[in-house]
Amino acid sequence: MTSPESAPYRAIAEQMVEIPGGEIVLRDEGTRTEWKVGVGPFRLDSCPVTRELYDAVVSRMPEVHGMTEVPEGSGVSASGAGPRAPVTEVSWRDAIRFCNLLSRVEGLAPCYSVGDDPDGSDVVCDWRAGGYRLPSEAEWEYACRAGTPGVRYGELDEIGWYRANSDGGAHDVATRAPNAWGLYDMIGNVWEWCWDVYDPAVYGPYRVFRGGGWNDHPRGCRASCRRKSHPTLRVDDLGFRLARTV
């Protein structure tokens, strides 16, 4: 059985990037609104969660005493990608539960309390806890841009896998160029769940995901592009990335 001190667990700590505090202006193209958000310093994994890491952590579940919040997704990529490709077929609720499970495996305080509501309305995040969590939408875009003002942090063919170059599937993480803060695959490869509710007045419990995926046209692969779906959605171009509060 894999221990927390051995790969792939060790790689998590090594891959976490210290993100400085600042602020970001978020934009919603549908409503043509924008709003400024302050972002405190935090840590973000340099890569999305891989199939290898997801499977290794979920396999530890029987060892974690009292752990009942089990990730339900299979973590299997419909595109036939390998173990170092981003995990897909995981819902927002699966990602939340994974964060709690990994936190407990590593002896950290979990960030989330999770109930039985399929809409996720009973999930509460303790932002002061030391465990793993999803980034907020503001944290995600702030980290993606890494201080750059453009549509993307580089030329799309150099930084991301998308419809024109992906050959119809996800690719191993960190095989395109990173941004200025050393974060890979923020644009393209797979979309990434964020914590936030998209617009509760219009879309109810739908949660935000960001970044574009391997099947998207360039318009979907932009730092500001926002999409949403129900917290139980599982598809083959949607995964997630780990964050921690400093």
Image (cartoon, helix red, strand yellow):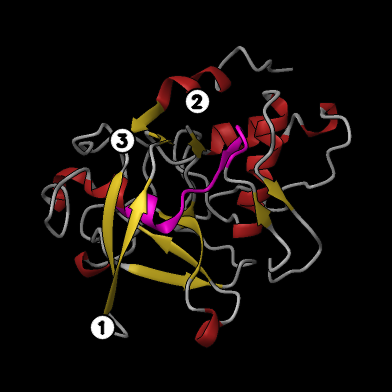
Amino acid type of the residue tagged 2 in the rendering:
Ile
- Type of residue at label 1? Arg
At a point 72% along the width and 30% down the height, the residue shown is: 104
Could you tell me if residue 63 is visible in this image?
yes
Q: Nearer the viewer, mark 1 or mark 3?
A: 3
Say if the magenta span includes residue 15.
Answer: no
Q: Nearer the viewer, mark 1 or mark 2?
A: 1
User: Nearer the N terminus, badge 3 or badge 2?
Assistant: 2
Q: In the picture, residue 48 is in which quadrant?
A: top left
Q: Say if mark 1 contacts mark 2, CB within 8 Å.
A: no
Secondary structure type for disc 1: loop
Q: Which mark is residue 43?
A: none
Q: For marks 3 and 2, give the one nearer the viewer.
A: 3
For the record, the magenta segment spans: 128-141
Amino acid type, residue under disc 3 in the picture: Pro
Q: Is residue 88 above or below residue 151?
A: above
Labels 3 & 2 near each other (Cβ < 8 A): no
- Relative image position of residue 230 (x, y in whole percent): 59, 72
Q: In the drawing, what numbered circle is on residue 20?
A: 3
* Residue 162 in view (yes/no): no
Q: CA distance from mark 1 to mark 2?
A: 38 Å
Give the secondary structure at mark 3: loop
Residue 245 versus residue 119: which sits nearer the camera?
245
Q: Is residue 87 above or below residue 232?
A: above
Residue nearer the viewer, 34 or 45: 34
Mark number for residue 12?
2
Q: Quadrant of the N terminus?
A: top right
